Amino acid sequence: MISFYPGPSRVYDEIPNYVKDAYKKGILSINHRSDDFMRISERTIRLLKEKLDIPKTYTIFYTTSATECWEMIAQSLITGKSYHLYNGAFGQKWFDYTKRLQSGAIGLPFDREKKIETVGDTTFEAGSVICITQNETSNGTQVDNRTIKKIKKNNPQCLVAVDATSSMAGVSLNFAAADIWFASVQKCFGLPAGLGVMVCSPAAMNKIESVGEKAHYNSLAFVAEMMQRWQTPMTPNVLGIYLLMRVMEKVKPIAEIHKKTVARYNQWIDFFHGSKPLSHLITNEAVHSHTVIPVKADPELMISLKAKAVKKGLLLGEGYGDLKSSTFRIANFPALKKIEIEKLQQVLKTFL
Ligand SMILES: *Cc1c(COP(=O)(O)O)cnc(C)c1O
């Protein structure tokens, strides 16, 4: 079954061979304090920076998931206020998780058909953290690099944190424009679930140190200390890190991947163009995500369409949250092959 779910999604074809290599090389039983592990970890981080175009001065941490990143930020980086600019279910969840840990969390929902330009002009309280969901997986919208840069420029005294879970490694992100970025690997990285990455600017690292929060096993102060030796406080997902290293060795630089992702997105837009029964959920193309395509359809039509796709070995993503019965989602992730997209379009064609 080929999964077009926007995460977990299709993994790269090479993954089974990489797992076999890991077994043969003894990596499945490796000690996480050993030199062998540190070499793998260092190389993985170096490759992430090279391939994704992350500034050398930034620090990268391993986490277990994007959800863990939400909590790590709330417990170790937010000391006063946090502003949550969101237009969908994932951004709202991040806000909800933060509220449970911090009393200063403020939700600033915005219309999913609109850019956050207007909110972007706001100046927020110094020392606070501004939280943005770059790619809202639930409704297929994104916040562009320019907007993120503008928000940071207007708020140099704040840290800007960006959830890029369903876009990192699929499109070019301007890491230099924000302070904290995170993603989990079961989306655009084309890897099995169970690993996340958090990318921190020098300013974020300074704040981690000055806050010095050490009450949790995953407190960023501990995590940062351990990462000086390419390690983690707990035994990490060593296989996941190894697979990430192998995938990062293999993938093209992000600028090339970006081009391909956008070309494929444009092709999907052309495909649905002019169809009445099937249309993109979001009318305003300027806010469309390039990696997640939400399609609005009549619930009955959707049932038969999904069933037909499954018969051909293609799994479509369900709508998310409130949009469950009125939309389905198509992942536009790099690991999906042209031939698989064509196969799916063959199925969908009869419903256009
Ligand atoms: C999938 C997703 C998450 C949650 O990821 P986990 O790895 O399950 O924690 C968070 N934010 C966004 C935008 C997502 O797409």
Image (cartoon, rainbow, N blue to C red):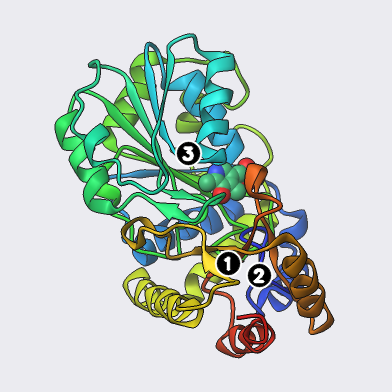
**Mark in the foreground, 1 or 3:** 1
Could you tell me how far apart the alpha carbons at marks 1 and 3 are, in whole angstroms?
33 Å
- The three-letter amino acid code for the residue at tag 1 is Ala
Q: Are marks 2 and 1 in contact (CB under 8 Å)?
A: yes
Residue under label 1, please give it: 331
Judged from the image, the secondary structure of the residue bearing numbered disc 2 is loop
- The three-letter amino acid code for the residue at tag 3 is Met
Quarter of the picture holding the N terminus: bottom right
> x, y (%) of residue 340?
64, 85
- Residue for point 50% across, 77% down: 272
Q: Nearer the viewer, residue 218 or 135?
A: 135
Q: Nearer the viewer, residue 351 or 266?
A: 351
Which residue is outermost to the front? 276
Q: Is mark 3 within 8 Å of ligand 1?
A: no
Residue under label 3, please give it: 227
Judged from the image, the secondary structure of the residue bearing numbered disc 1 is strand
Residue under label 2, please give it: 4
> x, y (%) of residue 90?
55, 40
Q: Quadrant of residue 163?
A: top left
> x, y (%) of residue 296?
59, 62
- The three-letter amino acid code for the residue at tag 2 is Phe
